Structure formats: structure tokens, C-alpha cells
Amino acid sequence: MVSHHIHTISHLPLFTSKLQHNLQQLSQLFEVMANDNLKVLNALDLAKTQWYHFTAIVIAGMGFFTDAYDLFCISLVTKLLGRIYYHDLGDDKPGTLPPNVSAAVNGVAFCGTLAGQLFFGWLGDKMGRKKVYGMTLMLMVICSIASGLSFSNEPTAVMATLCFFRFWLGFGIGGDYPLSATIMSEYANKKTRGAFIAAVFAMQGFGILTGGMVACIVSAAFKSKFPAPAYEVDQLGSTVPQADYVWRIILMFGAIPALMTYYWRMKMPETARYTALVAKNAKQAAADMSKVLQVELEPEQEKMVEKPKNDFGLFSKMFLKRHGLHLLGTTSTWFLLDIAFYSQNLFQKDIFSAIGWIPPAKTMNAIQEVFKISRAQTLIALCSTVPGYWFTVFFIDRIGRFAIQLMGFFFMTVFMFALAIPYNHWTQKENRIGFVVMYALTFFFANFGPNATTFVVPAEIFPARLRSTCHGISAASGKAGAIIGAFGFLYAAQSQDKTKTDKGYPPGIGVKNSLIVLGVVNCLGMVFTFLVPESNGKSLEEMSRENEDEDVEVVETESVRANENRTIPV
């Protein structure tokens, strides 16, 4: 018996040594888990730019191409819809959509987009980015086609079905915002991440440009095949029956690019950051990334062990403490930007009419009017919208997000006031080209500025488990601004003179005062930009502070943070 105890005691040093060794291994394991030192995430941050990055840009970007096409093409055909379905015999002006119908047709997709951004943003964090990505695209394809097949010849029925399908089209489009941004940010390396996310968003420019070009081509073809007199010559004859096909073809074309990318979206693996940090399966994350990126990844452990402390939710005090001001910054700047951006973009045809780029409606037939409006939009997209996006892509990782956003809001403010204050000067015939140049520069600095950066930053600064949700909230705030801009500008831009308002509209504050209001809005955007942190050159985990304990206040200097990251209490 005594010898048995002596034998047991003699093994105690060995047992203690093994226990210490195991505790040391466990400590090292926590260190790997708690820091951003997971090899797969480091490999993604340091990976060289390669072919799959560009493939991902195209796959994600085609969704945005479709988004922009579908959201903006409606503004090209609203005048045509008014002529076809709301013509009053004997009226000296062509038919126009009544104010409530026009507001619904123009704004209903934005309402759908807002709802989709919140819903699919949340779902992307719950189910994973890949599972939700295909749903949004199929919804866009189905509703693009359906909106062009709006039933009946009765105005009420056509508008009701058009609005119904455009709401659900917007719902699908809304999902694309948080998912595309999050997927691209989680695939990209930290050196060129800003450019990659901005490049996805820049496909919007090509979508707007293509919308104008498709409308030009379709209207030119119908105008050639079915010639018609101007409205003032023959009121009924100016709108040929075949004009009803024009708007339907333009709307339905949006389904084609979305359908073309569906297969490739389904082939994309789940992002490594979601699999490793949210699903907590680092081995699967490494396997997925090895298939698509040419990086050497050592096998990780099967399941990722995470300290239970750092899993605060969206409505927690810790989230408010760490990211509350950041979320306020991303939501407010996007909200303010979109008030200005969408009020200009959706109703730029009215500004073109005011300065004489588009002749009075009664001097044209219905299809000719579509051609003139779409040509004007195509020229603006070509000269200012598209270049602005790609300037952002080129400079965002060189001068940073903050500088571009601040500069963009500043110049938008300057050009808005420069257009508004001497507005009567710009409306004179000899000064119209100057007006268009200033207007184009406003667009240029919107896109080489906050329109791109407000999309990029929310995909970089929040924790992986909340990234898609927070991006969706930020984007939905933007769409709330777009709704205000789209609906409000319809009424605000009307002339103060009752005799010069569009049919059915009450007098507004006029284009000049509307531009002053938009200048003030842009100035506020500049102020709220100071709440948004700079994420240039930093890893997603560093920006989101996912690796820090809730109960430890971290000193913000890089050297101290690095030391704290290496010291994990067990």
C-alpha cells in the first residue's frame, strides 16, 4: 500500500509538467484565436492581387450594374408613361403622370431597397453571405421581367402592377448592397481592399451609362420604324401605339446582366472571415480559400475556440461604446449624401429642360422625347459619373477614405452654391454650357467622393458577425435620404409661379432654392464625416477590434495595442 502511494507521488512531477504544458498550449491556442493571427486571415490580408480578385469584382459588380440600371432607367420613361396613359384630349401640353403616381413610380423601388437592405443585411450575418447572395439576384431577374409585363391597358392597373413589381425589384437590389460590399471586403487583401470594394460600386456608373444607351438605341429604332409628328402638330398621332413597347423593353433589359452572373455567384465559396470568425470553422475557411486564391495555407484546427466574452450584440452597451459613433457617422453621411445625389439624378431631365438641353415637350413626339432625355443622361454619365467612380478606385488606397469623402462633400457644396446663387445667370442661353459643366462637376465629386466612400467604409469597420447588418443599416439610412430626395424634389423644384408648374403640382420653391437646400445638406455631410474612422491599410480585425476583451480599455497607440494583443490571460 505504502509502495503504491510512493509510486503515485513519484508521478506527480510528471503530471504537473504535463498540466503546465497543456495550459501553455491552451494559452497559445487562445492567443491564435483571439488575435488576427489565424493563418487563413493573415494569408488573405497579405495575398497578392490575383485573377480571382478581379473575378469577384465582376461577379459582385454585375449586381450593382443591374441595381443602377434598374433604379435609374425608370426616370428615362416616366414622361413616356404620362403621354401614353394620362393624355387629356385638347390639352396644349402632353400628358404627364399625376404627382402621386409619379412619386409612387419613382420612389417605390427605393422603399423596397430600404427594406431589402435591412432584411438581407441581417440575414447575411445569420445564414452566411453565399446562401443569401443567389436569392437577391433571382428576385432582381424575376421582377425586372415582371415590371415590363405590367398588366392591362388601364392606367390604374398598369401603374399598380408596375409599382408592385418595382417594390420587390428594389427589395432584391437592397440585399445586394450589404452582401456585395461585405463579400468583397472579406475576400480582399488589406493593401488594395478599398479599391476592390470601390470597383464593385463603380459598376453603378456603367449601369447608369448602359441605361441611357439602351434607351437611346431602343427609342432611335422605334423612332425610325414608326415616325410620328410632334405633339403640337397632332396630339393623338404624336404617341404611336408601339410606344408602349419602348418602356417595357427598357425596363426588362435589366434582367439580362443579372441572369448572366447567377451561375458564377453560386460557385463562389463562403468568405473565409465568415466561416472562421462567425461559423468558427477555420479548417473549412482554409480549404475554401485554397480553392480560389493562390496562397499557401497550413491546415487549421477543425473548430475555432473563441473566448465567450467578445460576442456582444448590436443592441449592447459594448457595441454602443465601441461602434456607436461609427454607425452614426456611416448612417448620417450616407443619408445626407443620398438626399442630394438622388434628387439630382432622378430629376436631372427637369434641369436639362430648364436650361434648354431638352426642347419643350409639345415640340416633340413621345419616342423622340425618350431619346432626348436618355441622350442627355448618357452624356452626363460618360463625362462625369463614370470617371468619378474610377478616380475613387485609383486614389482610395493612396489618400484614404476620409480625405476623399471630405473633399467630395466640400466640392459638392461649393458647386451647388455656385449653381444656385447666380441661377438666373446660368439659365440664359449663352451660359447654358457653363451650367452643364458645373452640374457635371458636382456629379464628378459626388462619385469621386462620398457616393463611393459611404459604401466602402461600413464594410470595413464593424465586426464580422455584425458587418453585413451594419452595412445594411447604413445603406438603408441612405435610401431613406434617397426617398426624401426623390419625393421632395418632385414638389420642391416646381416653379413659384402657378402658371409655370407642371400639371397637377402645387407651386414649389423653384430650382434655385432647391439647389441651395442641397448645398446646405452637403455641408452637413462634411461635418458628420468627422465621425467616420480611417480604415486605409488596416486589417478588418484591427478596425473592428474583434480581438479585444470587453472589460479591458485599450490604449489606442499601435505599439501598446500590439503588446496587449500578445498577452492573453488564461
Image (cartoon, helix red, strand yellow):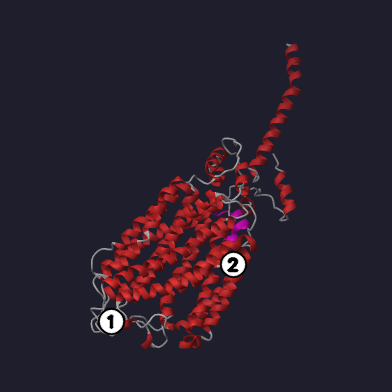
Task: Identify residue type, mark 2.
Answer: Gln
Q: Is 524 situated left or right of 166 in this image?
A: right
Give the magenta part as a residue range: 314-327
Residue that numbered label 1 is attached to: 231
Q: Main secondary structure of the magenta part?
A: helix
Which one is earlier in the sequence, the residue at label 1 or at label 2?
Answer: 1
Q: Is residue 324 magenta?
A: yes
Closer-to-camera residue (336/79) = 79
Q: CA distance from mark 1 to mark 2?
A: 45 Å
Q: Which image quadrant: the N terminus?
A: top right
Tell me where residue 122 appears, x and y as whole percent. 48, 53
Pair 1/2: label in front: 1
Q: Is 192 situated left or right of 340 in this image?
A: right
Residue ID at (47%, 53%): 59
Residue that numbered label 2 is attached to: 405
Tell me where residue 45 appears, x and y as whole percent. 62, 49
